[in-house]
Amino acid sequence: MHHVRAPLLSSDEIAPGHFLMRFAAPRIAAEAQPGQWVHVRCSDTWDPLLRRPLSIADVADDRQSFFILCRLVGRGTEKLVAKRPGETADIIGPIGHGFDLRQVAHSTPQRRPAVALVAGGYGVAPLHLLLRTLREQPGTDLTAAVFIGAETAERLLFLQRLDELADELHTATVDGTLGHKGLVTEPFQATMSSRPADVAFSCGPTAMMAEVARICSAHSVPCQVSLEQHMGCGVGVCLGCAVPIRADGGVVYRRACCDGPVFPGELVAWEDMA
Ligand SMILES: Cc1cc2nc3c(=O)[nH]c(=O)nc-3n(C[C@H](O)[C@H](O)[C@H](O)COP(=O)(O)OP(=O)(O)OC[C@H]3O[C@@H](n4cnc5c(N)ncnc54)[C@H](O)[C@@H]3O)c2cc1C
Ligand code: FES
C-alpha cells in the first residue's frame, strides 16, 4: 500500500454524473489487483474530513497510471470530480483483498472455463479490471458472459470496453431503454438456468449481489462479491466497515476494507447486511 500525491492526467464525463479519472501513480498502478480500491482525499481542505473509497477500474498498459470511475453523489465526489488535469490528489492504495483469480480454472484443449460477471451501475469498475486481467492471464482461455444493469441506457457504463472483452454482453435497464427491461439479475438467472457458469463475480447494489449469490447457490456455482460498506479509516482500525460473514455455524464480522471488499457470496449473511 502506498501513500502518494498523484497528478490527475485526465477526467472525462463518460455518462451524466460519471467521471473516468486517470491518475499518475506508478507504485499504485504497478501493484493494483482487480477488486482492490484506493482511498482518496477529495479536497485539500478538511472538508470532507474522511477519505472516499473508489475501486481501481483500470491500469495503463505501462503501469504508470490508473483509472477510477467516479459517480458524483455528494460532497466528497463533487470536490473530486471538480479537479482539473494537472491538479493532484492525496491517495492511499491499492487496498484490500480483491477477486481470487485462482477460482478460474486454467483452460485445457478440451475445456474453456466459463465465467459470468454481473454489475450494477458503477459496479462495472472493478469487474472491468478483472476481465481485462483474466484475458491477459497466460494459460487462461475462458468464455466470459457479462451482465450489466442500470436505471437507463445512458447509465450503462463501459459498454464498448466490456463488449470488446466479453464473449456475450447482456444489458438490462429498469426503464427498458436498452436491453432487457427490468433487473440485470433476470437475464443472469435465465442464462444460469440453461448454461451455468463455472464461477461468477459481482459488484453493485447490495440487493443485486444478494440475488446473484442466491442464484449461484441454487446452481452450486461459486461466486465472489465486492461489498460496498461505508468506510472510515480504510486500514482495519475503526471497524466502521464490518460485514456479517458466516463461519463455524454462526456469523462473525469481518472488515470490508482489509479482509475484503471481495468475499464469497455464499458466506455473506445477506439478511444481516445494513
Ligand atoms: C470498496 C468501495 C469501492 C467503491 N468504488 C466506487 C467506484 O468505483 N465508483 C464510485 O462512484 N463509487 C464507489 N464507491 C462508493 C463511494 O465511495 C461513495 O459514493 C462516496 O464515498 C460518496 O462520497 P460523497 O462525499 O460524494 O457522498 P456523501 O455526501 O458522503 O454521501 C452520498 C451517498 O453516498 C453514500 N456513501 C457515502 N460515503 C460512503 C462510503 N464511504 N462508502 C460507500 N458509500 C458511501 C451515502 O450512503 C449516500 O447515499 C465505493 C465504495 C466502496 C466501499
Ligand atoms: S474502514 Fe476502518 S476498519 Fe474498515
Image: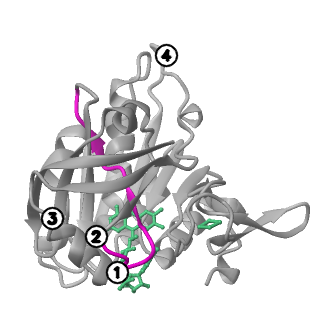
Q: In this image, 219 relative to 106: left or right? A: right
Q: In this image, 212 relative to 22: left or right? A: right
* 102 versus 22 height, above or below: above
Magenta span = 44-61
Amino acid type at mark 2: Ser
Where is mark 2, residue-wise?
A: 43
Q: In this image, 50 relative to 270: left or right? A: left
Residue 222 position, x and y percent, is 61, 49
Q: Which quadrant is the C terminus positioned in?
A: bottom right
Disc 1 to disc 4, how far (Cα)?
53 Å
Residue 133 position, x and y percent, is 37, 33
Q: Which of marks 4 and 1 precedes in the sequence? A: 1
Instruction: From the image, state whether disc 1 or disc 4 is nearer to you.
Output: 1
Element under disc 4: loop
Disc 3 to disc 1, how far (Cα)?
15 Å
Q: Quadrant of residue 174?
A: bottom left
Where is mark 4, residue-wise?
A: 108
The reply to whether the C-beta atoms of the residues labelled 3 and 1 are less than 8 Å apart is no
The reply to whether the C-beta atoms of the residues labelled 1 and 2 are less than 8 Å apart is yes
Where is mark 1, residue-wise?
A: 47
Disc 1 to disc 2, how far (Cα)?
7 Å
Residue at 27% across, 74% down:
77
Residue at 47% across, 17% down:
110
Q: Is residue 146 visible?
A: yes
10 Å neighbourhood of mark 2: few (<14), some, or many (≥20)?
Answer: many
Amino acid type at mark 4: Thr
Instruction: From the image, state whether disc 2 or disc 4 is nearer to you.
Output: 2
Disc 3 to disc 4, how far (Cα)?
47 Å
